[in-house]
Amino acid sequence: MIELFISAFVTLFVVIDPPGCAPIYASLTTGATHAQRRAMAVRAVGIAAAILLVFALWGKQLLGVLGIALDSFRIAGGIMLFIIAMDMVFEKRTQRREDRAHKIAETPEVEDVSVFPMAMPMIAGPGSIATVMLLMSQAEGIGERLVVVAAVVATLVLMLGSLLAAGPIMARLGSKIEAVITRLLGVLLAALAAQFVIDGLKASF
């Protein structure tokens, strides 16, 4: 159980990337009061948690309705995560997030960023939704599924902490250290994504 929790937690942490979301949140909430930033952070993580838990609990049934085999989803999800990993290694993902943040910041009527873009697509995006469904599809029995849910909750707790401490984190880390961490996490995610694809192919043939 401990190994499953660690594996699920590391995968979710790399995909959701709390340290990477912190600077984006800091830039999106520039000018907001401390209370407003705290409220938006809690709301964003709460909404993202609801979305991820819905897909974790009923994602398999959704695939069944659509006629999609779990092994096919493992392969597709692995490929998607591998693309995300390549973007992280070559810093394309960070650039896209920053571009999205600038567009939101330039829109004066947008004040509350908790739903968009923080809850979706930055926290509960396609990659994290696919990851949650993949992990739940591999879990056997209620015990292992609860372990995966616990990993989701733990990751989101860290996300909340990162958003609440976004300003101090960026002041201490700096852009260069953040880039190094992002690249290292990208390499790790690429290996995990490759394993998803291999498992899906083995089960299919």
Image (cartoon, rainbow, N blue to C red):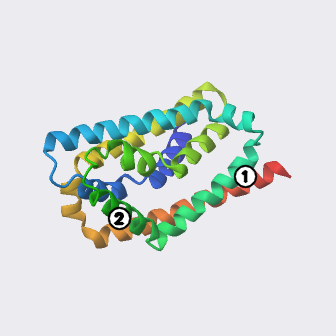
Instruction: Say which amino acid is labelled 1.
Output: Asp
Quarter of the image where one finds residue 172: bottom left
Q: Quadrant of the N terminus?
A: top right
Separation of residues labelled 2 and 1 (CA atoms): 34 Å
Quarter of the image where one finds residue 182: bottom left
Residue at mark 2: 98
The foreground one among 58 and 142 is: 58
**Helix, strand or loop for disc 2:** helix
Residue 143's x, y, as percent? Answer: 58, 27
The mark that comes first in sequence, 2 or 1, is 2
Residue at mark 1: 199
Residue 84's x, y, as percent? Answer: 53, 62
The foreground one among 49 and 30 is: 30
| 25 relative position to 65: left or right | left
Q: Residue at x 37, y 66 (%)?
A: 99
Is 87 drawn above or below residue 18 in the view shown? Answer: below
**Helix, strand or loop for disc 1:** helix
Q: Residue at x 54, y 69 (%)?
A: 86
Instruction: Say which amino acid is labelled 2.
Output: Glu
Is 66 drawn above or below residue 72 in the view shown? Answer: above
Question: Label 2: few (<14), some or many (≥20) within 10 Å?
Answer: some
Q: Nearer the viewer, mark 2 or mark 1?
A: 2
| 45 relative position to 30: left or right | right
Residue 148's x, y, as percent? Answer: 53, 36
Residue placed furthest toward the right: 205
Q: How many marks?
A: 2
Residue 52's x, y, as percent? Answer: 50, 38
Q: Residue at x 70, y 57 (%)?
A: 197
| 99 relative position to 31: left or right | right
Residue placed furthest toward the front: 109
| 18 relative position to 173: left or right | right
